[in-house]
Image (cartoon, rainbow, N blue to C red):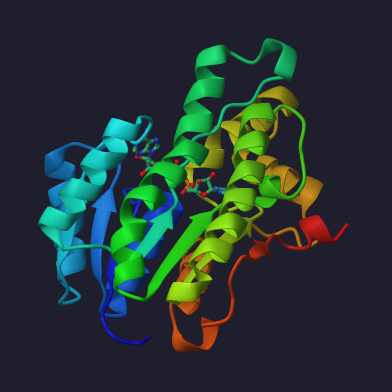
Amino acid sequence: QDQSQTVLVTGSTSGIGLAIAHTFAAAGHNVMLHGLENVQQGRALCEQLTRYGVNAGFSNADIATETGCSRLIADTREAIGHPSVLVNNAGVQHTAPAHEFPTDKWQQILSVNLSATFFLSKEILPAMRAGQWGRIINIASVHGLVASEQKAAYCAAKHGLVGLTKVLALENADCNITANAICPGWVETPLIQPQIESIARNESVDMDAARAQLVGAKQPLAQATTPDAIAQLALYLCGKFANTITGAALPVDGGWTAQ
Ligand code: NAD
């Protein structure tokens, strides 16, 4: 399907989501931006996308609740129309051992990283099925496939997201709708900055050394992936050569999960 699509990317005001928004807009697709920024900041990001000659919209609905998810879909339909591509990318992180993990952080991570994908998919699937074509791309993580210490909520949510992706793939295969999870290792974005800063502080090393230590501890190929590389894979999954890729969890992780 190389015609212009209507693409909703959650959490697209920063990091991987912003790169996905730019990549899809540059390829001629209309894009709905979304994140917790204010309307003015959202408008500035939209202006960057309309330079590609496509339509763009922005919503700052908080998708930690089902009501917020409904608002995001309503805002999207009003701004650019019904989405034929849904990229569930918004995510949050908090690290602590399970026996010290704050309950509110557990709830927030499960809500944003997992439940929002369920609510958004549930809401858009009837129209997507009626249109007999659609793409659901869930930005999971290597932590949807393997675990690390200190990440009880994140690993639970991302493993759940990989499972949800498989169910959506099975249920909607009859309507040319694919659902896939992308499972990145380390990607250089604001999300991982606190973890780099913590190594720099605890080991008294500079940020470059701390970043190298963080990435190298898990990835045999010790380079962080760029947000643009994740975005190109998402775009590929919407192209005509990816018609039969569905229900997959695709690692982009420098060999992390090969071990
Ligand atoms: P980021 O912190 O740069 O961006 C997160 C985005 O989500 C922002 O736009 C933010 O506004 C939005 N967001 C957060 N909570 C929200 C809420 N309640 N309602 C609405 N929007 C909300 O993060 P990133 O690193 O680009 O991560 C994007 C996705 O990729 C996440 O799902 C993350 O788990 C996943 N991921 C990241 C890495 C990495 O190394 N950075 C690795 C694997 C997976």
Q: Position of residue 186 (x, y in %)?
A: 63, 51
**Residue 160, percent across and down?**
62, 42
Does residue 33 sit above or below 213 in this rendering?
below
Residue 13 in view in this figure = yes
Q: Residue 8: x and y, percent? A: 31, 58
Q: Residue at x 49, y 78 (%)?
A: 236
Q: Nearer the viewer, residue 86 or 102?
A: 86
Image-quadrant location for residue 103: top right
Residue drawn at x 32%, y 49% as measured from the top left: 123
Where residue 141 appears, as percent x and y from the top left, is 62, 50
In the picture, residue 183 is in which quadrant? bottom right
Q: Is residue 177 left or right of residue 224?
A: left
Total number of numbered labels?
Answer: 0
Q: Can you name the residue that lies furthest to the right here?
A: 259
Compared with residue 101, is residue 251 higher up or lower down, i.e. above or below? below
- In the image, 256 versus 215, the foreground residue is 256
Q: Residue at x 62, y 29 (%)?
A: 153
Vertical placement of 97 versus 38: above or below?
above
**Rendered-image quadrant of the N terminus:** bottom left
Apparent side of residue 149 relative to residue 143 in the rendered image (left or right): right
Q: Is residue 109 above or below residue 216?
A: above
Q: Residue at x 41, y 58 (%)?
A: 87
Residue in the foreground of this view, choosing between 45 and 126: 126
Quadrant of the image containing the C terminus: bottom right
Residue 62 visible in the displayed image: no
The image quadrant that residue 47 belongs to is bottom left
Report the side of 5 relative to 192 (left or right). Answer: left
